[in-house]
Amino acid sequence: MIVYPAIDIRNGRCVRLNQGRDDAQTSYYENPVEPAEQFTRAGAEWIHVVDLDGAFGGAPRNLNILQKISSLGPKVQFGGGMRDAKLVDAALAAGASRVVIGTRAATDSQFLQEIAKSHGKKLAIGIDAKDGLVAVKGWTDVTQLDATDFAVTVSQLGISTVIYTDIATDGMLTGPNWKSLEALLKRCTCGVIASGGVASAADVAKLAQLSKAYPNLVGVIVGKALYEGRTNVAELLEASRT
């Protein structure tokens, strides 16, 4: 199971949001490349990077930072504002190994089918769930689309990866929503990366154990726990091999 240390970028800074709330932001680094360097030295093979400027409805503004992070060596999973094929291509050209699509994938079924055909193996679909329903536009709008049903649709289209985030746990350091995650794993056949709520290496060890029952659980994204000093990348990597 792969550990993805997370870097969220807004206005050029590395920040974290609690439960995706625009008014609950904490800044951690003026230069997002700095934590990327730390994660790389600790042995991270992948880094999860989100362009929050893009996620909240604007155009992605941080492809230059993506390029700098990818040049450090780890593979980069990049999302935020990826709303058309040209932007996906631009992110890949800037060094992303995998591009995350969220809002448009959930709101435009024709686009989802088209992008799956052209870029499926290099895509992850971000499924952000609030009370079991898909949330979009930086989590500001909640659709009537069932998150697990949507994950099944995505996997049937041949997309390699789903990133499942439970909004209620994100940034709260209370542990993942185990019940909803397992329900999704039972039905979704593509690779699933868990996100939201991871507070410690013990949570990652528990996910590693869960992945033995559900081999489609292929990764975990960890953000705030790292920035708050509750754990470190070396501990998480060790826990992931439990």
Image (spheres, rainbow, N blue to C red):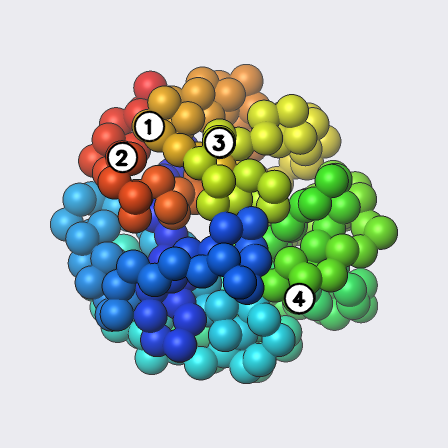
Which residue is tagged 4? 137
Which element carries disc 4, helix, strand or loop? loop
Q: Amino acid at mark 2?
A: Thr
Q: Residue at x 61, y 63 (%)?
A: 138
Q: Residue at x 40, y 33 (%)?
A: 199
Q: Earlier in the sequence, mark 3 or mark 2?
A: 3
Depth check: 20 or 89 in front? 20
Task: Give coordinates of residue 2: x percent, y percent.
Answer: 38, 38
- The CA span between labels 4 and 3 is 24 Å
Which element carries disc 2, helix, strand or loop? loop
Task: Give coordinates of residue 156: x percent, y percent.
Answer: 73, 46
Asked whether the residues under the numbered discs 4 and 2 touch, taking CB atoms below 8 Å apart as contact, a structural biologist would say: no
The N terminus: image quadrant: top left
Which residue is tagged 2? 231
Q: Earlier in the sequence, mark 4 or mark 3?
A: 4
Q: Earlier in the sequence, mark 1 or mark 4?
A: 4
Which element carries disc 3, helix, strand or loop? loop
Q: Which mark is residue 201?
A: 1
Q: Amino acid at mark 1?
A: Ala
Q: Earlier in the sequence, mark 2 or mark 1?
A: 1
- The CA span between labels 1 and 4 is 31 Å
Q: Nearer the viewer, mark 3 or mark 2?
A: 3
Which residue is tagged 3? 174
Asked whether the residues under the numbered discs 2 and 1 touch, taking CB atoms below 8 Å apart as contact, a structural biologist would say: yes
Task: Answer yes or no: is residue 98 visible.
Answer: no
Q: Residue furthest front?
A: 23
